[in-house]
Amino acid sequence: MKPNIGLTAGERQTVSEQLAKLLADEFILYTKSRNAHWNVEGPDFHAMHLFFESQYEQLDDIMDSVAERIRKISHYAPATLKQFLDLTHLTEYSEAENDSEGYIKELLADHESIIEFIRGNIDPIAETYKDFGTSDFITGLIEIHEGMAWMLRAHLK
């Protein structure tokens, strides 16, 4: 059934494309956070193992909400590793040693990159594509990523 939600097919298409890129970024960051959780070593192992777990659990919730937002505007969410790698702004490759500081620096940079991507989409999604729901949704995601980035940044002080 054709959606009747106040957005044209073109508006929904463009917004879903931006959300697909965001979902890909979230998936790559989730994977990198899992990697940090699994492979961190050092005297702070236990604390960082638990910390990275809390980070990837938050990202899991974010991924689900982004995919569901894509579905709410009547598009299909990308769901393969190839699609995510083709769409992401991030790199899956990690140059970090298996210590917490290296992982934290990489994850922090990725959160900041996602924040910038989202911030750059808030106004166009609302003003150009008239999708205030998605604009509001991604504004909320900025707050979550800022909180996660703050936690990472605090470890580097």
Image: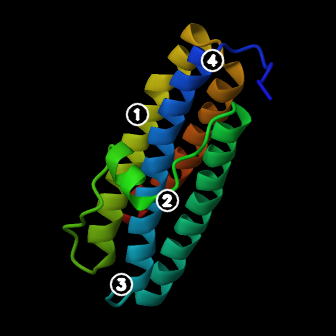
Q: Nearer the viewer, mark 4 or mark 2?
A: 4
The alpha-carbon separation of the residues under discs 1 and 2 comes to: 18 Å
Of pointers 3 and 2, the one earlier in the residue sequence: 3
Horizontal side of 44 relative to 9 (left or right) equals: left
- Residue at 44% over, 40% down: 21
Of pointers 1 and 4, the one earlier in the residue sequence: 4
Amino acid on which disc 2 is placed? Met
- According to the image, label 3 marks what residue? 39
Of pointers 4 and 2, the one earlier in the residue sequence: 4
> In the picture, residue 103 is in which quadrant?
bottom left
Confirm or deny contact between disc 1 and disc 2 (CB under 8 A).
no
Of pointers 3 and 4, the one earlier in the residue sequence: 4
Q: Nearer the viewer, mark 1 or mark 2?
A: 1
- According to the image, label 1 marks what residue? 116
> In the picture, residue 96 is in which quadrant?
bottom left
Q: Secondary structure at mark 1?
A: helix
**In this view, 124 is above or below 46:** above
Quadrant for the C terminus in the image: bottom left
Q: Nearer the viewer, residue 61 or 69?
A: 69
- According to the image, label 4 marks what residue? 9
Of pointers 1 and 2, the one earlier in the residue sequence: 1
Residue 94: x %, y % from top left: 24, 66
Q: Nearer the viewer, mark 3 or mark 2?
A: 3
Amino acid on which disc 1 is placed? Glu
